[in-house]
Amino acid sequence: MSGNGRSVEGSIALVTGAASGMGAATARIFGELGARVAVTDRAQDAAETVAAEIRTAGGDARAWALDVGDPAAIVRVVNDVAAHFGGLDILVNNAGIAGFLAIDNDGYEDLWDRLLAINLTAHQRTVRAALPHLRKSDAPRIVNIASTEALGATAMDSAYAASKAGVTGLTRALSVELGKEGITVNCICPGPIETPMTAFAPAEDKLTYARRRTSLRRYGLPEEVGHMTVSLCLPAASYITGAVIPVDGGLMARNA
């Protein structure tokens, strides 16, 4: 293990869903640490803002518009990123959506299809598009973002929970399949995090929930997920693969 095993400087990282929340925090941390960052998101203007912030801070970043629900767009953007930066070392599958409905709701089938397409199918498509480039890297890393809902579900979130549980299964299977090539594949399961996806809940309700359910008695910050993501992409993390890691303030450790 070389002396720079704690550095991602010079690595090329592609982050999906990077215009806000955990994705934006992850992209910024990569940039701060000297990685070259592809900031991708369906919201191109917001992605451009994140990329500009990274460049203003002295980093190297460019934004791409990417709707991960579009298979052709995934292939095009991944190849454009690799062509622009000269390769690809790190893929962070962060893009995702939420949705809650009872299973007997008339809209359930549509929600199921949408959640599986964005939260799971898009992950494997992005991995497939990235593989030819990752295979040329000296330290290839894939990190998939799931949720603690994959580990312990909430009422009326069966479609969402199934999509996220699928991400953990995909992660483990790909870690076995790609391990012989030195490509590590890991998964992070964020718990209650302060993101746009959780912004709908009143602050008082979130505080009550955090005190009741988490050991640290608070919601997490996007940066706390981002730092774990980056840690799994370090050269020093070369023997970690197939891991499913909760970043949840102790949520899953509690049974009462």
Image: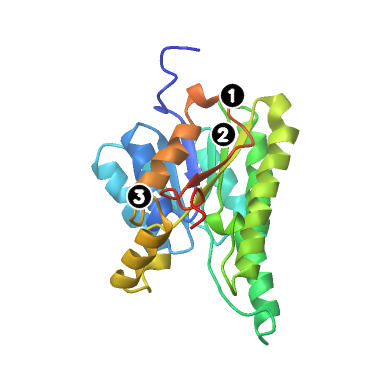
Neighbour class for label 2 at 10 Å: few (<14), some, many (≥20)? many
Q: Residue furthest bottom?
A: 106
Find residue 227 and name its label. Answer: none
The residue lying at 54 percent from left, 55 percent from top is 148
The residue lying at 45 percent from left, 50 percent from top is 248
| Residue at the disc numbered 3 | 216
Direction from residue 39 to residue 202 in the image, left or right? left
| Residue at the disc numbered 1 | 239
The residue lying at 46 percent from left, 55 percent from top is 191
Q: CA distance from mark 1 to mark 2?
A: 11 Å
Say if 107 sits above or below 188 in the image.
below
- Of mark 3 and mark 2, the one earlier in the sequence is 2
Mark 1 vs mark 2: give the one in front: 1
Q: CA distance from mark 3 to mark 1?
A: 29 Å
Amino acid type, label 3: Leu
Find residue 141 and name its label. Answer: 2
Amino acid type, label 2: Arg
